[in-house]
Image (cartoon, rainbow, N blue to C red):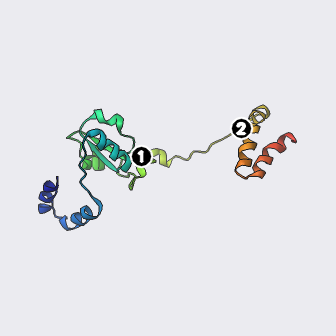
């Protein structure tokens, strides 16, 4: 792998920049099995992940974008085949995937309880509010029943 990286750098117009990026932000990790590789990948939560076959996909829990097979280069996803080029970096794929249309949709949650509904959950509301030290929250629910 290191030999191929050096071979590519030898003819890359941006070799100086690429070399610095590789030296500062890259590593070659040798593992004993594909399962171990998947485990490391899930811990790292990469922005881009290339895997050899779809069979591995069910084990991937954290990745911004997954490229499956020999004919799925990252560049294809970045520029033509993928949903977008805006992906989570620095392990943020543990928390979310890439940017999507849903990121531009404003969601407003609406809650409407009946008197019976609030009465049914009142003990949970007041117990949790008080356990967090939020007495006014507890009272805001209780006052509706003159407790």
Q: Nearer the viewer, mark 2 or mark 1?
A: 1
How much space separates mark 2 and mark 1, taking CA atoms?
Answer: 32 Å
Residue 136: percent from left, percent from top: 78, 52
Count of labels in the image: 2
| Vertical order, 63 against 23 (above or below) | above
Please identify the quadrant where the C terminus is shown.
top right
The image quadrant that residue 128 belongs to is top right
112 horizontally vs 16: left or right = right
105 horizontally vs 43: left or right = right
| Vertical order, 77 against 122 (above or below) | below
The residue at which mark 1 appears reads as: 97
Which secondary structure, mark 2?
Answer: loop
Which secondary structure, mark 1?
Answer: loop
Residue found at x 73% / y 36%: 121
Q: Residue furthest right?
A: 146
Residue 107: percent from left, percent from top: 57, 45
The image quadrant that residue 39 belongs to is top left
Give the number of the disc on residue 112. Answer: 2
Residue 4: percent from left, percent from top: 14, 54
Residue 118: percent from left, percent from top: 76, 36
| Cβ atoms under marks 2 and 1 closer than 8 Å | no
Residue found at x 52% / y 46%: 105
- For label 1, count other residues whose C-alpha is less than 10 Å away and answer few (under 14), some (14-19) or many (20+): some
Residue found at x 38% / y 48%: 43
| Vertical order, 6 against 59 (above or below) | below
């Amino acid at each position: 792998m290191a030999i191929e990286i050096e071979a590519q750098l030898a003819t890359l117009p941006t070799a100086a920049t690429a070399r610095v990026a590789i030296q500062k932000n890259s590593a070659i990790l040798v593992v004993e099995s594909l399962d171990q590789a998947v485990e490391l990948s899930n811990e790292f939560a990469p922005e881009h992940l290339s895997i050899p076959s779809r069979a591995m996909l069910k084990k991937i829990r954290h990745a911004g974008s997954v490229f499956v097979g020999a004919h799925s280069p990252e560049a294809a996803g970045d520029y033509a085949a993928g949903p977008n080029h805006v992906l989570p970096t620095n392990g943020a794929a543990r928390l979310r995937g890439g940017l999507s249309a849903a990121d531009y949709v404003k969601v407003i949650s609406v809650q409407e309880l009946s008197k019976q509904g609030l009465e049914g959950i009142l003990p949970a509301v007041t117990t949790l509010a008080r356990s967090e030290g939020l007495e006014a929250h507890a009272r805001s629910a209780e006052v509706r029943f003159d407790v």
